[in-house]
Image: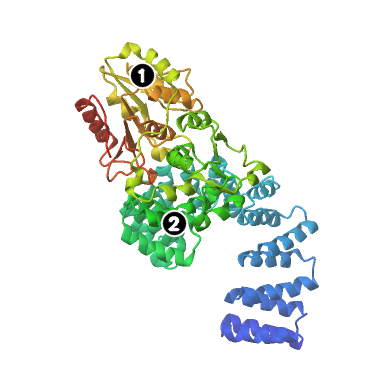
Amino acid sequence: MSNLENKLKKIIDTFNNINKEIAFKDIKKLSEKYNKNINVQNVLFQVAKKVGDIDTSINALKKIVFIENNNIAYLSQLYKLLLKKGLFDEALEKINYILKLDSKNYDALRDKSYIHLLQNNYNSAKEHIENIPNLKDDDYFGYNIKGLIYLKNNYFKEAKSFFSKAIQINSLYIDSYNNLGSCLLELEKLEEAKKIFNLAYNIDKKSVSTLMNLGNILSLQDDISGALKYYNEALNLDPKNQEILSNLAICHCREGNEKEAKIFYDKALKINPYDYKLMYAFCTLQLKLNNFDGAWKLFDSRLLIEKNQNKLKNFDLVKDNLFNNLKINPDDKLLILREQGIGEEILFSSIYPEIIDRFDDLKIEADKRLVSIFNRSFGKKIFVEDGYYSKNLSMYDFDKVAYAGSLIKFYRRNKIDFDYKDYLNARKDIVSVYKEKLNNYKKKLKIGISWKSVVNIYGSLKSLSIKDFEPLFTNDRLIINLQYGNIESDKKYILSQNKHFEIFDDLDLFNDIESCMGLLKNLDLFITVSNSTAHFAGGLGIPTILICPKKSSTYYYWDTNSSSSIWYKNIKVLGIKKSISKTIEDINNILDKNNEFKFSN
């Protein structure tokens, strides 16, 4: 045995049986002398890895693969360490080299897709994982990766099956439980998700991810005290975790606890000044409290939330005019752009009369379903279909371009600024058509109902069941459908109960907004959950009772604490305090005591 071999044997023996620090020091010193010796560098790599010095381990492996550049085993060890360090591009380079040597290398193919996943290249990740026809039967990590890739590509049911397979292989692999729960959450199966997160909690009660997931579920279900319990447990384990601090702040925002929300808000933003979701949550709390100065300073954070920004057109061209830089003179040629949802477009349009009075050279883009409505309601043909200017170079012909919501702060600075009446006008001919159709029911109270929000994510949190509304069906009332989307099963249920439900089958409530508004104008009362039709009713001045099933589903424009909306004087807002049946009972009492509904906020 050579002298060098004896030294290496002694270092290994010292590491295993005497003192790891001395052994590590000795092998580092020896590697300086034998920096091109594979055996020395291999021992250094192994020792450094075991003591947690990844950088030294990586450097040793780099020296080895420089000498043995076709050694797949060493290349694999190297890319996995690079991956652990978050050096994705370097890791990908080594993986691609392995695949040149062995195009069917299982680990390399799987981990290449994993890196694309980590880099948010979800389509590429899916493409690469599908290059493996069949994952190994015992590869729970591979099934977990494939599940995550499908989850990020919005293939929720497929993702669910992959996570379930990973758990079947390794019932103690907690990541797959958390991922499966997150998948069920996307499918809006909250109770199933909670059960899965609880299984993960039983495996490891100190998993920060699990504690946060349980907190998130309970927060969505309005169990704020339960959510805070889990968030605080997670915070005790990881006191500087920005996401936990942010979630705590958002939880307190939902509860209206300004003081507590501000404490966690400040701590979270100190760690991550770009948490726009948190900024917007705190902004909405300020709006609910009518603290407009503080709210409007944060209001543009809504545009920077990732899921919102992805929906905005030409954001890069507009962003310089936003935030504190937005200054517009009356002589400026101004283009106003719409934002994400049609409901908020209606909400923001309440300031259009004031903007039209101030600016002579003005164009406003709108959802194509709203162009004729806005041109008629606001008395000027300045409204054009979304993208008319913003999708081409003519956008540059304007002095200033701004999103509608970014102009709110100039026109709604105090509570008194919200003292406006209905501002939308329905077409008189359509109003007359529905008046004639309802002529046979003159003696009955005409009540429109809408019970679902079907467009937004987690729409079920804002939705009720047609069965919840069943007690409203009485002989002295005509219940009229204003629910868009597929309601075939709801319709069959009501008919099976021998209830009369007035449904205009030829009316497309989602696309034909002119007709929807014409029908709304014939109602004595509209009862609804939060959806776009609620905003139309608000803008038309229709007496409306709006039900908010969950605090997590409410928005700054619906205030369950005051049972009102500062934005729409004609809307009475009801949160479900005890049960939905008790809330419907309260509505029945309102109906029995009133012939005319004039809500004044």
The residue that mark 1 highlights is 501
What amino acid type is highlighted by mark number 1? Phe
In the image, what residue occupies the spot 40% across and 16% down?
A: 432
Relative to the observer, which residue lies in front, 216 or 306?
306
Viewer-nearest residue: 296 or 559: 296
Tag nearer the camera, 2 or 1: 2
* Secondary structure category for the residue under label 2: helix
Image position of 584 (left or right of 503): left
Quick one: quadrant of the N terminus?
A: bottom right
Q: Is residue 65 visible?
A: yes
Residue 323 circle label: none
Quarter of the figure that contains the C terminus: top left
* Cα gap from disc 2 to disc 1, whole angstroms: 47 Å
- Residue 311 in view in this figure: no
Mark 1 neighbour class, 10 Å CA radius: few under 14, some 14 to 19, many 20 or more: some
Q: Quadrant of residue 426?
A: top left
Tell me: 98 left or right of 526.
right
Q: Which residue is farthest top?
A: 440
Q: Is residue 377 left or right of residue 138?
A: left
Q: Is residue 480 above or below residue 144?
A: above
Could you tell which of marks 2 and 1 lies nearer the N-terminus? 2
Residue that carries the numbered disc 2 in the rendered image:
297
Residue under the image location 71 percent in, 72 percent down: 61
Q: Position of residue 33 (x, y in %)?
A: 74, 87
Disc 2 residue type? Lys
What x and y, as percent, mark residue 113? 66, 53
Q: Position of residue 512 (x, y in %)?
A: 50, 25
Figure colour scheme: rainbow
Q: Which of 318/262 is in front?
A: 318
- Residue 380, how many percent across, how many down? 51, 32
Of residue 308 and residue 191, the one placed in the foreground of this image is 308
Q: Quadrant of residue 522?
A: top left
